[in-house]
């Protein structure tokens, strides 16, 4: 990357089941205004706007970039929409960052969102097709057999997913923006919750949320408007692969491994568990924590579940590498925004701005998103120190 | 060798959605239910009807609501000589840009008129309300030429 860029503002809505009080534009607007206030800027200071959301069918709004231009102060400015399924929140942040890193723009506003209450995203993921059996599976149904295969290969105990479900909800109880607020959740409560897609129970799945997340990304000479320190972007990478092809490794996708290797190389990281202070990783279903611990090189293949069970990823157990201190996707899932929340929460950590879910002294953090059939990956590393 | 039969199948895909209107468009629609037309004043002083949530120039949130008249004038129009089933009127009519009294920008609606030669830029029109209003743009059944309607 040619020019340095940093996050100088983040803004989020409170995540909820239903925001009937606002239009879709009004929902984004809250996050955008919060990010601008955090950056000490107004709409007039912004050079370009980059938005992202999940597929159009989720909300039935075609060309949302046109509909949203007034609300985001984008009239007369370049505006771009990014679209990479569930990973879109992450790839939107990376496109916005590249607008600055290329030297083209000084300050870019980026916003992602979903208003799940006004649609039925789960079934829009799983449409019937002519000449084919309709599985009516949704996301959980797609991932359940992949998780089953992980359990078989790793010989992990059955309750690893239950542990993740509890850990991320306890984290979410520290975050006033999190949708699910379950400070008293127990392993037994998760285990007794309805089996949705064997082996995934209701409480091992993400909720369906309304919400938006925004960031302001600025060039090196434009980071001083915010009262808070900048989060320097130390590396960013995306990788894609087809949903299905002969011999595809679905448990530990190659695109994820390659993407991680790229972003670590940019940031000079050799041992992510030791060198990173905190990570916000896209875990919409509980078992994706141990699976991504391995895919992202925090653990050897087959060993990720041990980190989870030892409490290494838990704030409450003083783990050495907390994952998803904000509560993660398991606590809030406005799909289009969920990846950007990971990226923004990573930035909040290294800015010392994460409130009750702050990892003490965090200097280097990772944000991660995946989407489609675990086939789109986007990741970034942000740091308190200027590279 | 017989030619291969290439199969095809009709395919219809549908989803239902909800749309929350928010505080500005929602207020406009609620006003229509009460047979009242409300616009909003923009940062440059213009009154916009229907109202916009955010100022097109400054991006500021707008909330200075202004009730406008139920009469106005045609700015421009397009005559529909052969209405189809989906059209709001089944007699020949015009789609028109109508600037209501007190508004600074025109809104699009339909005008019922006996023939195209009754229409002109500047022609006065007035609202004909639907028999039952429900908070929808179709609460304005159509506009009619003001002289004819009286």
Image (cartoon, coloured by chain):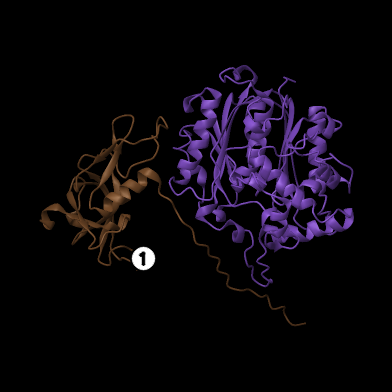
Chain colours: A purple, B brown
In the rendered view, tell whether residue B139 sits above or below residue A183: below
Q: Is residue A155 left or right of residue B100?
A: right
Picture coordinates of residue A245, whole percent (x, y): 80, 58
Residue at 77% in and 82% down = B1
Q: Quick one: A167 or A98, which is closer to the camera?
A: A167
Between A76 and A319, the one lying in front of the other is: A319
Q: In this orientation, does residue A81 appear?
A: yes
Occupied quadrant, residue A246: bottom right
Would residue A29 appear left or right of A4 to someone viewing this image?
Answer: left
Where residue B112 sits, quadrant-wise, is bottom left
Q: Where residue A192 appears, x then y in whole percent? A: 70, 59
The crowding category of the residue bearing disc 1, from other C-alpha atoms within 10 Å (few below 14, some 14 to 19, many at least 20), is few
* The C terminus of chain A lies in quadrant: top right
Which structural element holds mark 1?
loop
Is residue A102 something one can see in this rendering? Answer: no
Chain of residue at mark 1 = B
- Which quadrant of the figure contains the N terminus of chain A? top right
Residue holding disc 1: B86
At x 58% / y 56%, what residue is drawn? A121
């Amino acid at each position: 990357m040619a020019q340095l860029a940093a996050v100088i503002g983040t803004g989020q809505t409170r995540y909820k089941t239903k925001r009937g009080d606002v239009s879709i534009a009004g929902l984004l607007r809250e996050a955008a205004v919060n990010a601008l206030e955090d950056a000490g800027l107004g709409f007039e200071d912004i050079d370009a706007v980059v938005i992202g959301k999940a597929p159009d069918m989720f909300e039935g709004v075609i060309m949302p970039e046109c509909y949203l231009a007034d609300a985001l102060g984008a009239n007369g400015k370049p505006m771009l929409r990014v679209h990479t399924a569930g990973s879109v929140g992450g790839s939107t942040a990376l496109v916005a960052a590249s607008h600055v890193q290329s030297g083209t723009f000084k300050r870019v506003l980026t916003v992602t969102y979903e208003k799940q209450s006004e649609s039925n995203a789960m079934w829009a993921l799983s449409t019937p097709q002519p000449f084919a059996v309709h599985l009516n599976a949704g996301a959980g149904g797609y991932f359940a057999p992949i998780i089953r295969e992980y359990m078989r290969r790793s010989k992990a105990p059955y309750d690893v997913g239950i542990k993740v479900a509890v850990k991320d909800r306890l984290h979410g109880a520290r975050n006033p923006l999190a949708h699910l607020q379950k400070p008293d959740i127990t392993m037994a409560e998760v285990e007794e919750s309805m089996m949705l897609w064997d082996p995934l129970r209701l409480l091992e799945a993400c909720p369906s949320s309304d919400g938006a997340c925004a960031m302001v990304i600025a060039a090196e000479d434009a980071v001083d408007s915010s009262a808070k320190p900048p989060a320097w972007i130390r590396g960013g990478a995306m990788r894609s692969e087809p949903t299905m092809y002969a011999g595809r490794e679905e448990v530990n996708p190659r695109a994820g491994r390659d993407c991680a290797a790229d972003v670590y190389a940019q940031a000079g990281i050799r041992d992510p568990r030791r060198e990173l202070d905190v990570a916000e990783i896209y875990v919409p279903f509980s078992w994706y924590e141990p699976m991504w611990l391995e895919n992202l090189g925090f653990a050897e293949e087959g060993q990720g579940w041990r980190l989870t069970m030892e409490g290494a990823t838990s704030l409450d157990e003083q783990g050495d590498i907390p994952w998803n201190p904000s509560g993660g996707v398991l606590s809030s899932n406005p799909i289009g925004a969920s990846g950007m929340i990971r990226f923004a929460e990573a930035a909040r950590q290294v800015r010392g701005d994460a409130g009750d879910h702050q990892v003490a002294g965090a200097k280097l953090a990772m944000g991660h998103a995946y989407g489609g059939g675990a086939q789109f990956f986007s990741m970034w590393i942000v740091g308190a120190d200027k590279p | 060798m017989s030619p291969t039969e290439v199969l095809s199948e009709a395919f219809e895909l549908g989803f239902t959605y909800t749309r929350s209107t928010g505080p500005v468009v929602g207020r406009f629609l609620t006003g229509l239910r009460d047979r009242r037309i409300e616009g909003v004043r923009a940062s440059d002083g213009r009154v916009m009807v229907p109202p916009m949530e955010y100022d097109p120039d400054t991006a500021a949130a707008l909330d200075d609501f202004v009730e406008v008249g139920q009469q106005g004038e045609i700015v421009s129009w397009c005559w529909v000589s052969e209405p189809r089933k989906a059209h709001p009127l089944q007699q020949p009519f015009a789609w028109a840009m109508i600037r209501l009294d007190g508004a600074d920008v025109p809104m699009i609606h339909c005008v019922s008129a006996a023939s195209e030669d009754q229409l002109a830029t500047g022609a006065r029109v007035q609202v004909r309300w639907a028999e039952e209003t429900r908070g929808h743009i179709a609460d304005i059944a159509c506009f009619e030429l003001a002289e004819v309607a009286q």
